[in-house]
Amino acid sequence: MDYSEQIKLFNKVRARHSVFLLSVLWKLTGDRELFSEAMQYTLLGIWQHIEKLNGKKAQSYIYRIALSANSKAWRNRIGRNGQIGANLVSSLKGPDEKAARTERAAIVRRAISELPTKQARAIVMRYLEQHDYDAIATTLRCSEAGARSHVSKAVVALRKKLATLAKQGK
Amino acid sequence: MNDDNIEKILSELGSQEIPAEVRKITEEVSRDFSKTLTQSRQPKLYVLGDYLMKSRFTQLAAAAVIIIAVLLGINQFVGRGAGAVFASVVEQLHNASTMTYSVVTQTPVESMPTLRIEMAFKEPGYMRTTTPDGYINVIDWAQNRGISIWPVRKQYIDFEASNYQHDPAKGAFALVEGLRTLPCQADEVLGEKEIDGRVLQGFRVIEESVTNTVWVDPQTRQLVRVEMEYADAPGMNTIMTDFQFNIELDDSLFNLTPPEGYTPLEVHADVSTVTEQDLIDYLKVWSTWTKDGTFPPTFNPIDLPKVTAEMIKQGEFGEGETSEQQRQSEAMQMYRGIMFVAQLPANSNWRYAGESVSYGDADTPVFWYRPAGSETYRVIYGDLTVEEVLPENLPR
């Protein structure tokens, strides 16, 4: 495949998955800057792996790339000291219930970005995209019981992470 | 936060509307990204610049990226596996004055990107490699000189190629002779297969730990595709395609003069004289760059540039000022240290285990190898002392 063909394929793949990427990355980030960053990393990932994205496994790769990009964007935002950037926190905090909900959502999103890939994918498919377990099992190439297990483990892992974060006051 | 709320919060995330502004951001990001691909062949991330520091360590780490790019280019000529395939291609080249092809290397490791290199050859010994990231390497074997160009940073390295393996009696060029009659010497004839709409004749040639699958157009007898698999690296493969012979390649493509406005990073090391001490010095130098005094995270030539860039972004290199002379000296030390490892033969069984090990850790082995003809291994520890160790006592 020459360079122009690669670009054509890239644009085709991007167009085919744009709705999915827009939806999932926004739900995972909930912040415009973070979203922009995650989207850029995703596009870079698609470009770097474009040779692998022309077959039946494309959707699977796209998932991995998007989740990896989301984690990377969150890592950049959180910083080496483990704190969410002050600008993000200040924009979330507020006296009313809506602000509190937004803050909780941000904490959950951050916790998702730190989940192992398979668990993150299971939780995204189940809750953010509202797929049934049969579809999750097909995508994760496991049994329906296995899919339920991945989701369940992810929820447990999220609870633990959130408890830790709550203790740390982040 | 109440545990019972988690699933509720997750469900709320799933039902969120996407603001029109976010759709607009998506369009802009996509358009800008595609534009950089079309205009400069260099995908640009607008988020990354904020994290780059202008310290000497960042500059040296950046130099590492260039140096590795040089090594990657050179390995296309003399590396064992690549050399074998290169040789099979050169078999057709014997009657050609120019040749171009693409090399794509993939690994099963998600964090390691697919590596694509465009190769061009022109008699009497010009070679040029280009990567989608913009790295360009040109070698003129007649002059034994080369240049590595990094357009993104407007930097280049002049290097001498005289010390690399380029002996027609051995290395890659001996394989050329061995593969001149490749189909007759194939270990296995695979028969015909349709690839990309063409019916091709396949042959399998196994050389030590590398399995080459060669696809030839039976009508034109032209080499179309070569696939390489590595017994030592399951899941990794290299595919060479897009072969073109005797096409017009302008001499300017092989010009060793740096582009105007580019700054040099001189590398005139005589790598035939590199020693274990060069490796030790490199490890020491690197540990002074990192904030936590750790050694390089990897010696993998494909992984190191990516990991280094990530370390720069994460602020893992310290800040400090130094002279241009010292920068050059440390970059040179790095180059020599890497070349020492690059030139170790396969049967030296070298291993690197220095990731996350800090300088001064006298109990942890970071590198070991068996010198030619030796019964024992040389083991370098975290305090950079060296001991002779019997094979059965090597670290597990």
Image (cartoon, helix red, strand yellow):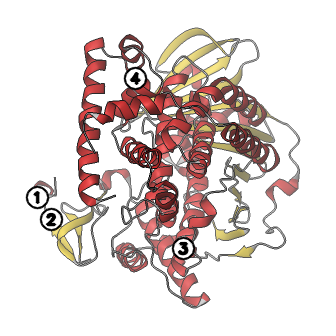
Q: Of callouts 3 and 1, which one flags the residue occurring earlier in the amino acid sequence?
A: 3
Labels 2, 3: one chain: yes
Q: Residue at x 80, y 41 (%)?
A: B98
SS at circle 2: strand
What is the CA distance from the residue labelled 2 to the residue labelled 3?
36 Å
Q: Nearer the viewer, residue B394 or B245?
A: B394
Labels 4, 3: one chain: no
User: Where, by quadrant of the figure, is residue B230 drawn?
Assistant: top left
Query: Measured along the vertical axis of the image, is residue A99 above or below residue B260?
Result: above
Whether residue B146 sits left or right of residue A62 in the image: it is right
Marker disc for residue A126:
4
Mark 2: few, some, or many residues within 10 Å (few <14, many ≥20)?
A: some
SS at circle 3: helix
Q: Position of residue B89 (x, y in %)?
A: 65, 35
Q: Amino acid at mark 3?
A: Thr
Q: Position of residue B257 (x, y in %)?
A: 81, 68
Q: Position of residue B212 (x, y in %)?
A: 51, 28
- Look at mark 2 in the image and give the residue it sits on: B389
Q: Position of residue B127 (x, y in %)?
A: 72, 52
- Tell which tag, 3 or 1, sits nearer the viewer: 3
Q: Check if mark 1's residue and mark 2's residue have beta carbons within 8 Å.
A: yes
- Look at mark 3 in the image and give the residue it sits on: B58
